Image: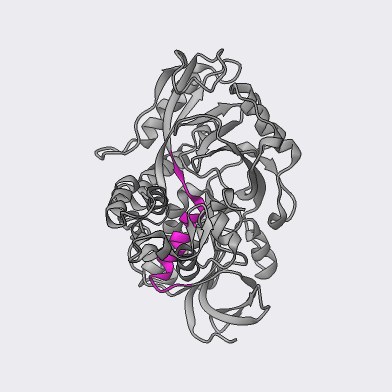
Amino acid sequence: MQQTDIKDLLVIGGGINGCGIAADAAGRGLSVTLCEQFDLANETSSRSSKMIHGGLRYLEYYQFRLVREALAERDVLLNIAPHIVQPLQLIIPHNSLQRPAWMVRLGLFLYDTLGKRWGKKSKIPRSFSVKLQSNNAYAKPLKPELHQGFCYYDCKVDDARLVVLNAMAAHERGATILPRTTFLSAKKQAGLWVSTLQDSRTQQTWQVKSRALVNAAGPWVSQIVNHDLDINTQHQIELVKGSHIVVPKLYSGEHAYLLQNTDKRVIFVIPYHDNFSLIGTTDIAYKGDPATVEIDPAEREYLCAVVNRYFQQTISPSDIVNEWSGVRALKADDASNPSAVTRDYSLEVEDNNGQTPVLSVFGGKLTTYRKLAEQAMTQLKPYFPNMGPAWTANTPLPGGDIGSPTDYAEQLSAQYPKLSPSLLQRYAHSYGSRSPLILKDAQSTTELGKYYGSDLYHCEVAYLREHEWAQTMEDILWRRSKLGLLIS
């Protein structure tokens, strides 16, 4: 198959940065093709802590600009994707053997200050001290010797859906999205890049001509620059593995915990899909193939041990019902501790006398993807002077044109009174205003099609296949819906 039309951009990588750049570029009037060797959000972008946050612990490494930018983006994402991004209350039980109380309080003061939106109303409350006593909801699951704590707020997010929604935003503005399509190589020809792509299922190859390339391949970014494109880059990346575990719910309530460990790392314990608790993450230097990364037994023991240091209910690796590991491609620096490697990003443009530019993305984090995409467009503007202005900060992502998901679920209940409230609540939090595209005129569960268990019906499967590029049950159960936790 030979593709003859000329695109402005070929974006390599269907994670959060690639899809964010594709959406931003398409919305500015550029013609875009995006290829991803696996499913969208198949790797790092679906293996996070499911949080939109400024990075409280980054303050210890003096990364004030990164924290300020991330906190500003937290407010933006709350507004443009309220169905999948919601405020999250976090409790820090104070343990005097780790950071002293004054240091934690100072850090929270700085966090509040950096996140303050002058002259604007934020949905995120300020931090405060809490007493862990009288068997209150915060203290109840914790060991009785913990008496003091702190409360602050960030946000939770469905990470894989954030990626897919950006791909949808790109597609709806004219971009071509090609999951399960591998980038093989590219060569310069007559002022263009001629790239060879391969269908990962059929092995069929074809070519795409583009005026520029965007290398947003995450853990594979250096491989594409150094091998597939034969470009000498100034930047190097460091691969860091982060692993998470999921166990049956450890406590009641929607608040999360940030636990300080003896090695100065912090571990999150977060409510996860009603019946579970998500625990993570580790930070370990990684040298292997990012596509085959797995959690190590030592990581399981490590995460369980941190929880057991604080919680009355003890857990062991035998309690784990799900787990994942992701490889983050971080911009290499001189830090000897993987936890200290910066989560900031860098964009590098290589060109040939002002032609055939390649923009490569090094580093980055889920929270700042939108700002990264804007800066990528700024870097590419000299090559595309007619591109439109920035637009993503005030435009809802698909399904995000609602008030709150709770209020929208009530609207759905009025529109579909005979359908399960739990089903409509999940749709409101996953699909927002796109929910009627799935439900259509159904007034009973029999009209939703075949039932697969745990509120999954054929109408949702058909929607995910038609509108969200889902092709396998793993795409549907683990990335698009997370129902794999409940369905055999």
Q: Which residues are magenta?
A: 155-176
Q: Position of residue 374 (x, y in %)?
A: 41, 58
Q: Is residue 384 above or below residue 91?
A: below
Instruction: Describe residue 23's horizontal placement relative to residue 297 as left or right.
Output: left
Q: Is residue 263 above or below residue 464?
A: above
Q: Is residue 93 above or below residue 270?
A: above
The quadrant the N terminus occupies is bottom right
**Residue shown at 44% from the left, 60% from the top:** 165
- Residue 280 in sight from this viewpoint: no
In terms of depth relative to the viewer, which is nearer, 210 or 184? Answer: 184
**Residue shown at 52% from the left, 77% from the top:** 210
Q: Quadrant of residue 380?
A: bottom left
**Magenta-colored stretch includes residue 162:** yes
- Residue 103 in sight from this viewpoint: yes
Extreme residue toward the left, this view: 119
**Residue shown at 61% from the left, 82% from the top:** 206
In terms of depth relative to the viewer, which is nearer, 124 or 112? Answer: 124
In terms of depth relative to the viewer, which is nearer, 297 or 351? Answer: 297
Question: Tell me, what colour scheme is on the image?
Answer: one colour
Q: Position of residue 342 (x, y in %)?
A: 57, 42
**Residue shown at 63% from the left, 49% from the top:** 326
Q: Is residue 14 above or below residue 145?
A: below
Instruction: Describe residue 269's horizontal placement relative to residue 168 as left or right.
Output: right
Q: Position of residue 457 (x, y in %)?
A: 48, 61
**Magenta-colored stretch includes residue 104:** no
Q: Position of residue 16 (x, y in %)?
A: 51, 56
